[in-house]
Amino acid sequence: MIKVENLTKRYAGQPAINDLSFEVSQGEIMGFLGPNGAGKTTTMRILAGYMPENVPLYSDMRVTEYLNYRAALKGVQHRRIAERMGDVEELCGLKEVKKKLIGNLSKGYRQRVGLADALLAEPDLLILDEPTIGLDPNQIRQVRELIKNLGRQHTILLSTHILPEVEMTCSRVIIIHKGRIEACDTPDNLLGKIRQAGGVVLEAKVGNDNGAEELKKIPGVRDVVTEGADDWKRFSLWVESGTDVREEVFRLAADRHWAVRELTQRRATLEDVFVELTHPDLV
């Protein structure tokens, strides 16, 4: 559905993206990730026809008026406009607000109107740039479910900074950094490749001991972050991939007579992958 080969774009002689190559298969939801300035928006603009971060709508038009107008602009056959409007209003959950002025809608509903607009001409491909930005948690869930449903009939390239959203929605992920692709794989495969696979959280009273330094001595522990200003300290241990240090942590706590009220393993997330690939100095 999308095939990009050796794509390069320069602004004033400086490369924004450099030799990008990737493919998105039909019916796939592909996450497109990267820090600010990595080249995501440039790439999406070149691919064209995407839903922008800030949806440009006519606030003084009613939802049905706007969708009717946009369908005509997109060349939808006149006899099919009413049918397509009904379909996208149903799919995007706009039935109850279809007679309201767009300017009176919440941001969540305006995002839905933008998606409905993008779907009117039945495109095979949707390119979505930060579709949930500025939404509250309930609205994010609703839009996430909508995107998953759209993925049954459309190919989707999704750019977002909300990484749990990508883990729950996308079948594959591209991570771009400084104009180059750093990784392209399924979320599970990416998690299996990183050097640090989550970690361990310990909450304990360590008395006069330097808990962080003691924990760093355990083989496989790469770093320890300490939180807490009272007697109870919370230690977040970053560990090597494939390493479970909970038994060693428990043994250390017992030997040092620390009072423990939490010892849990933290699963690696896509955020860990993202940080390791784009900011290795932070891991």
Image (tube, helix red, strand yellow):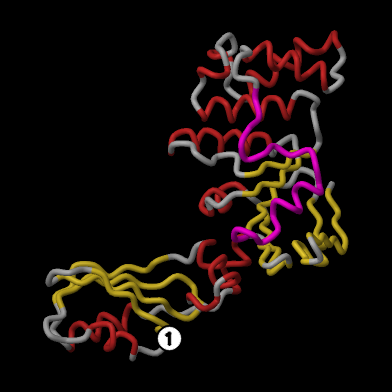
Rendered view: 74 above or below 184: above
Give the tally of numbered discs: 1
Task: Give coordinates of residue 65: x percent, y percent.
Answer: 68, 11
Q: For the stretch drawn in magenta, what is the main secondary structure?
A: loop
In the image, 100 versus 182, the foreground residue is 100
**Residue at the image point whose x is 63% and y is 19% from the top:** 90
Apparent side of residue 206 relative to residue 115 in the rendered image (left or right): left
Residue assigned mark 1: 220
Q: Which residues are magenta?
A: 34-57
Apparent side of residue 76 relative to residue 38 in the rendered image (left or right): right
User: Which corner quadrant of the image does residue 16 belong to?
Assistant: bottom right
Badge 1: few (under 14), some or many (20 or more) residues near its Cα, within 10 Å? Answer: some
Task: Give coordinates of residue 283: x percent, y percent.
Answer: 48, 76
Rendered view: 17 above or below 220: above
Residue 168 magenta-drawn? no
Q: Element under label 1?
A: loop
Residue 51 magenta-drawn? yes
Question: Callout 1, which amino acid?
Answer: Gly
Apparent side of residue 135 relative to residue 191 in the rendered image (left or right): left
Rendered view: 281 above or below 20: below
Rendered view: 108 above or below 230: above
**Residue at the image point whose x is 48% and y is 75% from the top:** 282
In the image, 274 versus 243, the foreground residue is 274
Task: Give coordinates of residue 57: x percent, y percent.
Answer: 65, 25
**Residue at the image point whose x is 60% and y is 19% from the top:** 59
